[in-house]
Image (cartoon, helix red, strand yellow):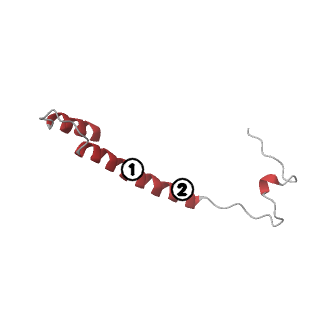
Amino acid sequence: MTLGVLAAVATSSSSSDDIGAGVIAFLIVAAMGVALVFLLRSMNKQFQKIEPRPDTGDGQDAAQDPKTPAETPK
């Protein structure tokens, strides 16, 4: 919807042969910036939902512990 409106404004307001990056380019970049802000906020919320691995206490990661059996996909 937004791109259609921007395209309509671009075709209706060009009364001269001088073409330059103007309001349309600014609006596109601003919309991308707003989308980036919302994506970053969403990503931070998802990262906050992740719980850290429980510490094994022996200094090794749980994934590298040879005593732990590997999970196989079913």
Q: Is 34 on the left or on the right of 19, as rendered?
A: right
User: Which amino acid type is shown beneath numbered disc 1?
Assistant: Ala
The residue nearer to you, when weighing 44 against 24, is 24
User: Could you say whether the residue bearing mark 2 is in a helix, strand or loop?
Assistant: helix
| Above or below: residue 56 compared with residue 18 | below
Q: Circle 1 is placed at which residue position?
A: 35
Rendered image: mark on residue 46: 2
Farthest residue, direction left: 15
| Three-letter residue code for mark 2 | Gln
At 84% from the left and 53% from the top, the residue drawn is: 68
Residue 62, image x, y percentages:
78, 56
Residue extending furthest right? 67
Please name whichever residue, 34 or 15, is drawn nearer the observer in this view of the structure: 15
Spot the residue most to the front.
18
Q: Is residue 51 left or right of residue 56?
A: left
Q: Position of residue 39 (x, y in %)?
A: 45, 52
Instruction: Give the image location of residue 53, x and y in percent.
Output: 71, 60
Category of crowding for the residue at label 1, using alpha-carbon neighbours closer than 10 angstroms: few (below 14), some (14–19), many (at least 20): few
- Residue 47, above or below 8: below
Residue 7, percent from left and from top: 23, 35
Q: Residue at x 32, y 50 (%)?
A: 30
Q: Is residue 1 visible?
A: no
**Nearest-to-viewer mark from 1 and 2:** 1
Please count the marks in the image.
2
Which quadrant of the rendered structure holds the N terminus? top left
Element on which disc 1 rests? helix
Q: Where, by quadrant of the figure, is residue 65 drawn?
A: bottom right
Task: Give how far apart the Cα atoms at labels 1 and 2 are.
Answer: 17 Å
Residue 25 or 53: which is nearer the viewer? 25
Circle 2 crowding by C-alpha within 10 Å: few under 14, some 14–19, many from 20 = few
